[in-house]
Image (cartoon, coloured by chain):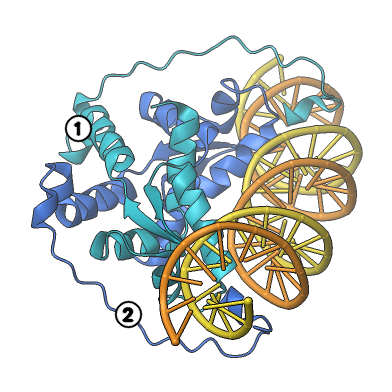
Chain colours: A blue, B cyan, C orange, D yellow
Amino acid sequence: MTTDSMDAVFQALGNASRRRILDILKGLPGCSVNDVCRYFDTSRIAVMKHLRVLEQANLIVSQKTGRTRHLYQNTVPIQMIHERWTTEYSALWAGRLTEIKYRVEAKPKIRTGKGKRDGRNR
Amino acid sequence: MTTDSMDAVFQALGNASRRRILDILKGLPGCSVNDVCRYFDTSRIAVMKHLRVLEQANLIVSQKTGRTRHLYQNTVPIQMIHERWTTEYSALWAGRLTEIKYRVEAKPKIRTGKGKRDGRNR
DNA sequence: GTCATATGTAACCTATAGGTTACATGATTT
DNA sequence: AAATCATGTAACCTATAGGTTACATATGAC
């Protein structure tokens, strides 16, 4: 999982309406766009934008049959993040802070151009 | 954990620089703002804005001694989300999709005012 | 064929994200 | 005391988020 796709997943999850859509699709797999809209007070277009964000983050998939678009939750990205975290932070989850291996490496900083007039802002 | 704080946590995690800061603090607990800045090519102010977002999401805490501000990761919010997900999506994690209980309830939709001229956009 | 329905697209608006430079302030060092 | 250093704040800029209305298109029903 690339860092860009992690960006997309977390950003998509960073909105209560979108998390709610995932809950709805969990309960009504294959439902239509209008079905989802019934749960919201906002316009259909706003919901469709949320669906677009979720689809680009690969958190949902859609399949069109006729004129209706059927929506399904895709649990793979959340599973991948879950697995990654449980391995990477396993010591933290268990509360065993001392077991964490420190492995941060400082990359040489270059910071070319783009101003930097006042050195105190570095 | 309120939905607002979940918003804050996920939004904070939805940025690679901020996730990187968490990794840095995991490896260098108690380091200063300038220490963190050495890992980035952006200005110190940009890093401080990321730190503000992380602190408002409660993902880091800071303690000032003298003129230096010491930064520490706070694992509680991620632990809470992890726990919530492992209970709520436990069937999904294990790949047992059929075990999920459907429990979505449709709230009556009212949608007062604010336009709605074209009914097709509902 | 006509009409209603489900979805898609375009243009617009306002608030926020993420970056910058300039400047201010308190703590250490010399 | 003076200089330096770590941090904080203010003002600004551009791109994106999240919402709206208006319009377009394709499909199902009668």
Q: Is residue A34 above or below residue B18?
A: above
How far apart marks 2 and 1 lie (CA) works out to: 38 Å
Element at badge 1?
helix
Q: In which quarter of the image is residue B98?
A: top left
- Chain where mark 2 sits: A
Sort mark 2 into few (<14), some (14-19) or many (20+) by Cα contacts within 10 Å.
few
Tell me the residue that label 2 is attached to. Answer: A106
Q: Position of residue B121 (x, y in %)?
A: 75, 31
Q: Which of B12 and D6 is in front in this view?
A: D6
Residue linked to disc 1: B90
Q: Residue at horizontal 32%, vertical 19%?
A: B102
Residue at coordinates 41% horizontally, 46% vertically from top-left? Answer: A59
Residue D27 percent coordinates (x, y): 62, 37
Note whether residue A21 is visible. no
Asked if residue D14 lies left or right of residue A62, the reply is right
- What amino acid does circle 2 point to? Ala
Front one among B35 and D1: D1
